[in-house]
Image (cartoon, rainbow, N blue to C red):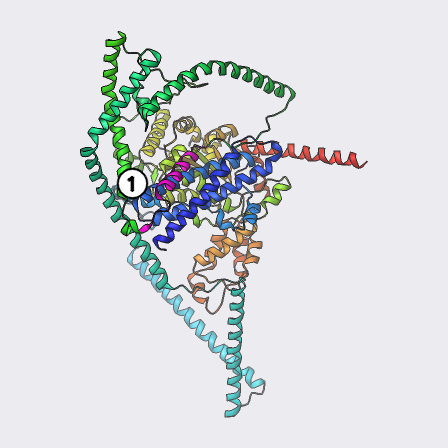
Amino acid sequence: MSEGAYQRLWDSSHVTLQELLDQEQPLLEPQPSQERQSFQYRISLLYLYYLGLLRRFDILYDQMVQPQKRRLLRRLLDSVAGRVLELKEEMVRLDLSECHCLDHVLQDLQLTSADLEVPIPKYFLLEQSNILQEREHMLAEILSRMEPVSFQERFPSMNRTDAIILLQMAERARQGRLRAAFIREIRRQEERDQKMRDSGYHKFNQHQAAMTIQKVWKGYLQRKRTQQDRQTEMAFIGMAPLPNQVDLSTMSLANLGKDVRKFRQEEREEEFQLAIVKTKDTLRETEEPDMKEKIKDQIRQWFIECHALTGRFPSYPDESLGGSYQIFSDKTPEQVRMELELQVQEDSKKDQDKKKEKGKERKAKKGKEDKARKGEADTTLKVLPSKFIPLINAGHEEYKNVWKNRPDHIYPNQSFDPETLRAEKRKEMEQEIRIQVDELMRQELKSLRLAVDREMERPFKAPKKKNGKKAWKRKEKDLTPDRSMSSLFEELVIFGFLKKSKTVALKDYIGDCLYLGSTLSLANKLPMPSLFDIRQNVALYGVLRLGSPDIHSLAPLIRSILLVGPPGMGKKMLVNAVCTETGANLFDLSPANLLGKYPGKTGVQMIVHIIFKVARLLQPSVIWIGDAEKNFYKKVPKEEKQMDPKRIKKDLTKALRLLNPGDRVMLIGTTNQPQLAEMRGLCRTYERILFMPRPDYASRYVLWKHMLLAERVQVTQSLDISALAKVSDGYTPGDILQAIRLVLTERRILQLPKRPLVASEFLGHLAKMEPVHREEEESLKDWYYKTPLGKKWMEFSKDQDAAEEAKLAKEKKKRK
């Protein structure tokens, strides 16, 4: 794509953004509960539209060259991603489920399931590549200094004579197999000759032999041609995959174009950084003195006007509240005077308004108390206030005021705009100068008070917040104040708490979405999440939050996730995928990994403190706990009493509470037996519980197809994937992958051109595995219904059933 194409994509994206901002305002108004379905539908529409915008802004930020546009795109990209997370929270609050049925919305908008995919911004890894390389180098250096593992116990030693005898036995066995195969072929040839003699075989003449060969050859050619035509027709109507005809030259040219744009981005960024320094120096030389005098004149005029209106000099705003910037930002002395006069008038009105508000509040409280006595609930629906919409509005306004309808020929080679840069740096310099001027004017105000009013300085009183409580933060006591980060890092690596995560992309967690979710919701049944839904939830809760500090600081805070599902569902794979997509460090705090390390109460307190301290210093970080139910056992088994898995429970919950917005540290637990844990403690520690049931038919079909292609096997018509998907009901993705690898040995892969795969080859291996029985899955479902979110859904479904029964009873009475 050319730069003009990206500019057109940017323009169209802002048209969509303006439409979405117009739709946001009505949702802030309370809606009656009878409109619950339409309200959910509107939230789902906004969610899908913002996902599309997130995808567009990611492409634009990755490929645009102009540095000032890229900075605006970065702010818009983070703001839209944050709004997606806020809408996700709204959908969970309305649906009372982590899984959302959007198939009817996709159908109305004529979209596909690919539009539900949560895009992961590319800059998550690109902009911290140097940091990741340094961490990998540090980890590799520490591991290289550790003692190498000896393999003598695993492979016992053997003397020379025994080794020679072993090799002789293997060679004789190989020769015997070859001799047996040769004799078998000779016997088959003798049997064929005997059959030909018994059937009265006679020699053909030259003409008959030629006719026979022609028949066989023409039949072979026609069958091959018919097979090719059938394959082409099936591919044309979409019933068979297209042949892998990839034009390498086209792909290489596309990749070359992206590399060139990346190189141009770096060049323009270097030019822009040099221009920033030059612009600052120029502005300081030319405009700084005049700007100082102008600000002083504004503040002195404010002193005079306040003294004329009130008879006293005003109190100077504190530096923590912004100083004089909050009062004089882009204002003339006349505007300041008008504001002061209006403020005096408003003060007199406030007393009257307060009396009226108190009367209204009393009436509202009485109404709520009456409702509570009668057993009625507040049934209004509305969207909670957003922290990202003001940022999106600001970015959209900047686009309209600065970048919209600008001809591209003004900026040759996509260089920066000097006028925009000068205006931006002028504002920054004005803020710096205002801080210096405020210090001088505070002294001048103090002198004026002493000279005119004969009074000392009065402290500036900040306006009190209504219904506000004193904000305080829990401060963690540093148990390792004298130790450096590198020494703590090395200690965690040596003891096996800090590990190198496996490189796994989140898109490799394959699964299809649930196509009948809305039908199940209408039937008042909770649809179970598909593998696609699980992947999207991990992207929303884990990847988007950990990838960007700007998103994490303003998005709804989620400190921990619990993945619940049977073995083989890919829980550990998802943990590694979160680390791969965000470049996060992986800390292993599993009970099995703690065995024999840091004994005693102080030891556990120390290791938890070190892990969370290093995780904060090396953000982003993922702390993984395998077999998370063991930390909250109802009753510790006898064989695990020596392990003492519950000793980390208190320190873990304390450390989690100390995580604030901006601390990109996430606890991810995995378990397949949550029934053994104490429900209250587990749900307090893990804020989001993602249930992972066995895959449905659609996900199994996609899994079989993708895993076979990953093993370099071309799927043919002889292999019925639909039958495999039906037969493998109850098996996990891990079981399916294991069956494929057991069948596709090196010898079988070599035989594929002559003997294609058939579905029956996999059945024997699947039969030897233990599937996930319905009883096991039902017990996990029953446990999930006891979680806080599951309880809310159960109560809501009971209310819905009662309302439907009441309607049916009324209709029967009317008919009678």
Q: Amino acid at mark 1?
A: Thr
Q: Is residue 34 above or below residue 700?
A: above
Quadrant of the rendered image containing residue 767: bottom right
Q: In percent of the image, x 41 and y 47: which residue is there?
A: 11
Q: In percent of the image, x 55 and y 44: which residue is there?
A: 102
Residue 639: x, y in percent?
Answer: 46, 34
Instruction: Out of 720 and 702, give the one closest to the viewer.
Output: 702
Quadrant of the rendered image containing residue 442: top left
Residue 504 appears anywhere in the view:
no
Give the magenta-colored segment's residue range: 386-408
Give the left or right position of residue 127, taking residue 516 as reference.
Answer: left
Give the left or right position of residue 120, taking residue 209 as reference.
Answer: left
Give the left or right position of residue 427, taking residue 469 as reference.
Answer: left
Residue 406 appears anywhere in the view:
yes
Q: Is residue 395 magenta?
A: yes
Secondary element type, mark 1: helix
Q: Which residue is mark 1?
A: 420
Quadrant of the rendered image containing residue 543: top left
Residue 684: x, y in percent?
Answer: 48, 28
Residue 634: x, y in percent?
Answer: 51, 29
Residue 2: x, y in percent?
Answer: 35, 55
The quadrant of the rendering that contains the N terminus is bottom left
